[in-house]
Amino acid sequence: MATIVDVAERAGVSISTVSHVVNGTRKVAEKTRERVMKAIEETGYRQDTLARSLRRSRTDSIGLVVSDAGQPAFAEMVRGVESEATKAGYVLLLANSGENPEQEARVLQVLAARRVDGLIIAPVADSTGAEVDAIRAGGTPVVLMDRLGRGEGGDWVGVENTGLMRELVAHMAGHGYRRIALASGDPRVSTIGERERGYREAMAAAGLPVPTGHVLRGAGLAADTEQAALRLLSGPDRPEAVVCASTETAVGVLAAARQSGLSIPHDLKLAVFDEFPHADLFEPRLTAVRQPAQEIGARAMSLLQSRIEAERSTAKAVTIRLKPKIAYRTSCGCPAV
């Protein structure tokens, strides 16, 4: 196996010059750099990244933990994190927690053991925060993304949830609908809890009651929501409209409406917080809150990078709330444009 010494001898330069070319630690004359790169290719030299990491106390890697990277919002956030991480020269290690606190703790332990330079986490509903606190105490920077964690303090990047849900529900009430239900999910997830609060505030402001059973709670998965929505839509107090707190609950409501023989928007109005990919191709076209999901990921990575480079920074924790936009389409009863 070729060594840095072999490269230096073939290129006719010093070992330190080869190191500067490989690590980018000092500017090297272009012709010299070309000789070194040619020698690397001819010798088949590969840098020992582990040894380099030990020398620098860095691994040039970032850990990212989300509940399900396949969900549209998280997929875009992951894309944003990865794009910024790549620009900064970091490798991204992605793990799914599966909305399971034990799984979350396990993957965090694994990533910490791999000595990642920093972590970005969307904590699960039942997360105690103990593992995150331990990682922070060990000197590894952590940024929470999308969801708030237990307790106070720490860097966080997400969106305004309560106000936007309040605005979405107020729009539905403005159409004259009085029976507006919410497909919520698990309110222990901070984003869902904030959206449920926005729903209740908007209903109260409009002077509208929230009948028993009109807030569908649970795990927030499509299958669970579908069963709850089937009971609601077949009951005597069927709502005129349903607002969904996530794309996952929206899938459940749409499936239940189809099984119940209800047409959207003719029989049931629908709006959703968050948006499906290629939403403009849906029929009916769904009214939805558009999260700047990719920007959330990018901003989280930029913030984490600043913490890594600061090294033991005592700077005050940063909270970044981005504001989504609402795309009003036909599913809520708005006319086609």
Image (cartoon, rainbow, N blue to C red):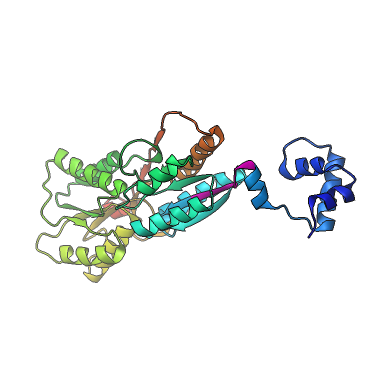
The image quarter in which residue 256 lies: bottom left
In the rendered view, tell whether residue 31 sits above or below residue 69.
above
Q: Residue at x 23, y 47 (%)?
A: 196
Q: Residue at x 89, y 51 (%)?
A: 10
Tell me, yes or no, whether the highlighted magenta stretch contains residue 202. Answer: no
Tell me, yes or no, whether the highlighted magenta stretch contains residue 59. Answer: yes
For the residue pair 268 and 12, the one nearer the viewer reads as: 12
Image coordinates of residue 238 in percent, x first then y, are 14, 60
Q: Residue at x 32, y 36 (%)?
A: 152
Image coordinates of residue 68 in percent, x first then y, are 41, 58
For the residue pair 195 and 121, the one nearer the viewer reads as: 121
Image coordinates of residue 306 in percent, x first then y, are 53, 35
The image quarter in which residue 284 lies: bottom left
For the residue pair 173 and 252, the one nearer the viewer reads as: 252
User: How many numbered dots are placed on residues in this image?
Assistant: 0
In the rendered view, tell whether residue 158 sits above or below residue 248.
above
> Can I make out residue 160 in this image?
yes
Q: Which region of the structure is painted magenta?
A: 56-63
Q: Quadrant of the N terminus?
A: bottom right
For the residue pair 31 and 150, the one nearer the viewer reads as: 150
21 with respect to 123 (left or right): right
In the rendered view, tell whether residue 124 sits above or below residue 326.
below
Image coordinates of residue 337 in percent, x first then y, are 37, 49
